[in-house]
Amino acid sequence: MAGKSLDPSSSPRALLGAELRVARERAGLSQAELGEPLFVSGSFIGQLEAGTRRMHIEFARQIDEILGTNGFFVRNCGAAAKSKYPDHFAAAAEAEALATAIREYAPLIIPGLLQTEAYAREAFRAYQPTAPESVIDNLVENRLARAVLLSDPTTPMLWCVLDEAILRRAGNEQQVLAAALRHVATLMRSHRIIAQVLPFAAGLHAGMLGSLKLMSFDDAPPLAYVQGMGTGQLFDDPATVTQHTLTYDLLTANALSPRESLALIESVAEEYEHDQHA
């Protein structure tokens, strides 16, 4: 392994994880035993091996020392860490691409996987009103590239809870929002996604503190991602993931049914299309 390097064009994180599994098993260590001197859980090592978590350089150095891999992981973790997404979201975006199920609560904006190009452009321009057009173009391109996940007819399973505020915040872009809502409705009608609207009538609720994304995997423990303004944190601690899962369950319990949600989304889109929305 000492002279081997990973090909950065060939899913480097997955390759690095596969090499970690081989090296660990060759050393006769369980995931928990390797995690102990790194002060991380065995599930975290499992996520590194599955490619759902990024290997940082400090871990790479220690792993090379523990497993006697001659600097292999230090040399290659740089390629595996490269991302086109902001640092606070990179790990979540990369885990999202490997998830078999994604459940997301969105309080203020249509989730990135469901956005149209025009909606994404307006959103990024609102975040960065003075950014050059080339910067906005790049952000939009990267966001739309994530939606390729939905080209598979069944995987990942995507279940979203949309706060009613998303449907009502149109401003001067009523036609843009109408088209975006129609896109969500089309995905619902084609049975590609499950979506529910959390109405204003629900009052105070479990998701008042921000957005939430839960991700499940075939060969790794589940993850929870909580995002704020310019920040985000990915959790793998089982107790924390369980707590966030309960939050999501409470949100779905207070939301409209998928059938009622579809009717509301299409009704609001029609109002915007005919400029009838108050």
Image (cartoon, grey):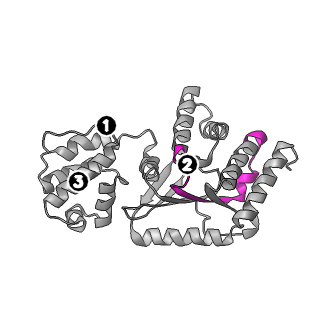
Q: What range of the chain is rendered magenta?
A: 148-176
* Residue 137 shown in magenta: no
For the question of whether residue 88 can be seen, the reply is yes
- Identify residue for label 3: 20
Give the answer, above or below, for where 248 lies relative to 172: below
- Identify residue for label 2: 150
The label on residue 78 is none
The label on residue 8 is 1
Locate residue 105, reporting x and y percent: 59, 60
Q: Amino acid at mark 1?
A: Pro
Q: Earlier in the sequence, mark 1 or mark 3?
A: 1
Q: Earlier in the sequence, mark 3 or mark 2?
A: 3
Does residue 147 appear left or right of residue 199 in this picture?
Answer: left
* Residue 171 shown in magenta: yes
Does residue 263 appear left or right of residue 31 in this picture?
Answer: right
**Element assignment for label 1:** loop
**Separation of disc 1 and disc 2 at Cα?**
25 Å
Residue drawn 77% across the image and 40% down it: 175
**On the rendered image, what quadrant is the N terminus found in?**
top left
